[in-house]
Image (cartoon, rainbow, N blue to C red):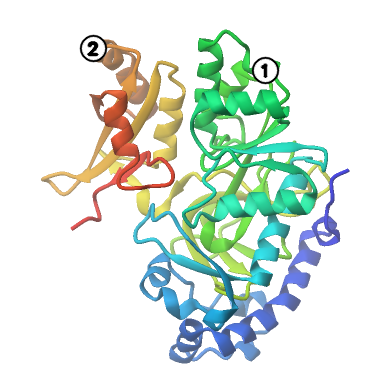
């Protein structure tokens, strides 16, 4: 039976009171141990002991990604000898950031994913195949492996890639669950088809999907999820996470957003002015970590735009839930009078079976306006591709990006510049001088 912490079964008001009790010691810790926040408190004349309400807390300045990148070392709250592991962000939105974790932070990370696996109803009898990077300072690999260990389930660390090897391992070890990027599941399905066996004939029953959303704005399965479900009878679970947060929000079987764990983070959804949005409105996910020793964060703006859902869930948890990332604030595209985010483009492309791989490129035109190009590898001649895709884009947004057709190898080189540990599907050249 799935474990649900007592606090996650309390009302939202009771959770807020619980978090307020945790917040005071967390702020004192930052004042005493964080060079960055001690400096910020002084410059802004903030007395952390004088904060008496959530309204007071909302007046504390937020922390930007740029600050974490620029002053990375100043966020460290422990002596180097207390650090047990250094991990890093992928650098998708700029220079990678190093995150230092103490032994307690590693235990907290394991507990976080232990809760995630309980959300997806995993048990100690499951065998999970980890189809994700497990080296190169990638936090997710360590987190999921540690969470499974705490759960008592078995792990198979196959890493990403090589569908033939993945299927051989699934069959040999009788794998019951996967942790994988959803688009890679399509490669597994394609390999199964090419070798005349149905993907659903094996032992895999559940997939914890990372890195890509499986839901649309209405919390319904998006094109990627529908493609997978049409070929493979597995239960798909979305998750939202970021390295800086050291915390994940994972769906339960209800599929109505990723569950918040109030014992681990304070969550705010803010508008452009830094004010809380009304329930159901889109806002920037802003996080304050609880229980982190190495590099805790205070009102950290992730750049991710989501909606929050606050009614109790059928699974028994009463926590708020985060919907899918609707876009990243700095990746908003203004193209020929239309405003859109990359996930909306991904959803259109994922809904076309003939498209095997793609990369979206945003640049600045000679007129200073955003330009949008899509590089594709697909099973169509360019003329046929244009005939199919142009009406899809025109119907959705009344504008059509430039379409470029490339070989599989050319797309692979775009997706893996340098030694990237995960594929790049968006190249934003607007902020490169």
Task: Please give the label number shown on residue 29.
Answer: none
Q: Is residue 12 above or below residue 23?
A: above
Q: CA distance from mark 2 to mark 1?
A: 35 Å
Is 33 on the left-hand or right-hand side of 5? Answer: left
Q: Is residue 122 above or below residue 199?
A: below
Most foreground residue, 362 or 177: 177
Q: Is residue 288 above or below residue 309?
A: below
In the orientation shown, which residue stands out farthest toward the left? Answer: 366
In which quadrant will I find the C terminus? bottom left
Q: State the residue position of label 1.
A: 200
Most foreground residue, 388 or 297: 297
Can residue 256 be seen in this snapshot?
A: yes
Crowding near pointer 2: few (<14 within 10 Å), some, many (20+)?
Answer: few
Most foreground residue, 221 or 243: 243
Could you tell me which residue is drawn at 60 percent across and 54 percent down? Answer: 142
As helix, strand or loop, the secondary structure at mark 1 comes to helix
Most foreground residue, 337 or 233: 233
Residue 407: which quarter of the image?
top left
Residue 336: which quarter of the image?
top left
Q: Position of residue 233 (x, y in %)?
A: 68, 20
Q: Is residue 255 above or below residue 37?
A: above
Q: State the residue position of label 2.
A: 383
């Amino acid at each position: 039976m799935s474990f649900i912490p007592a606090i996650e079964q309390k009302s939202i008001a009771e959770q807020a009171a619980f978090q307020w009790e945790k917040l005071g010691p967390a702020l004192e810790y930052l004042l005493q141990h964080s060079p960055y926040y001690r400096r910020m408190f002084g410059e802004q004349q903030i007395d952390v002991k004088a904060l008496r309400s959530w309204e007071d807390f909302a007046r504390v300045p937020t922390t930007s990604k740029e600050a974490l990148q620029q002053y990375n070392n100043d966020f460290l709250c422990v002596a180097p000898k207390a650090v047990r592991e250094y991990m890093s962000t992928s650098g998708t939105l700029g220079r990678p950031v190093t995150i230092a974790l103490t032994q307690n932070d590693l235990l907290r990370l394991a507990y976080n994913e232990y809760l995630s696996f309980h959300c997806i109803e995993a048990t100690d009898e499951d065998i999970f195949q980890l189809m994700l990077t497990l080296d190169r300072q990638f936090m997710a690999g360590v987190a999921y492996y540690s969470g499974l260990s705490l759960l008592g389930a078995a792990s198979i660390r196959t890493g990403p890639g090589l569908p033939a090897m993945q299927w051989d391992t699934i069959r040999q070890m009788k794998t019951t669950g996967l942790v994988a990027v959803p688009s890679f599941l399509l490669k597994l399905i394609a390999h199964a088809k090419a070798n005349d066996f149905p993907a659903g004939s094996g032992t895999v029953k559940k997939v914890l999907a990372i890195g890509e959303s499986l839901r649309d704005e209405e919390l319904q399965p998006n094109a990627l999820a529908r493609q997978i479900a049409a070929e493979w009878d597995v239960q798909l679970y979305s998750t939202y996470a970021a390295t800086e947060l050291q915390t994940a929000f994972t769906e339960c079987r209800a599929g109505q957003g990723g569950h918040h764990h109030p014992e681990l983070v304070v969550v705010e959804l803010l508008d452009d002015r830094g004010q809380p949005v009304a329930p159901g409105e889109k806002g920037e996910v802003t996080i304050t970590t609880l229980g982190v020793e190495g590099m805790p964060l205070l009102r950290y703006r992730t750049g991710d735009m989501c909606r929050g859902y606050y009614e109790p869930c059928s699974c028994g948890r009463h926590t708020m839930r985060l919907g899918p990332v609707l876009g990243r604030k700095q990746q908003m595209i203004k193209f020929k009078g239309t405003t859109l985010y990359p996930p909306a483009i991904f959803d259109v492309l994922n809904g076309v079976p003939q498209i095997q791989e793609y990369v979206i490129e945003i640049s600045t035109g000679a007129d200073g306006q955003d330009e949008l190009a899509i590089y594709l590898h697909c099973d169509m001649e360019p003329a046929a591709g244009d005939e199919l895709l142009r009406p899809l884009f025109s119907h959705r947004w009344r504008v059509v990006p430039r379409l470029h057709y490339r070989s599989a190898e050319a797309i692979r080189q775009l997706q893996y510049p340098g030694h990237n540990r995960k594929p790049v599907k968006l190249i934003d050249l607007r902020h490169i001088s």
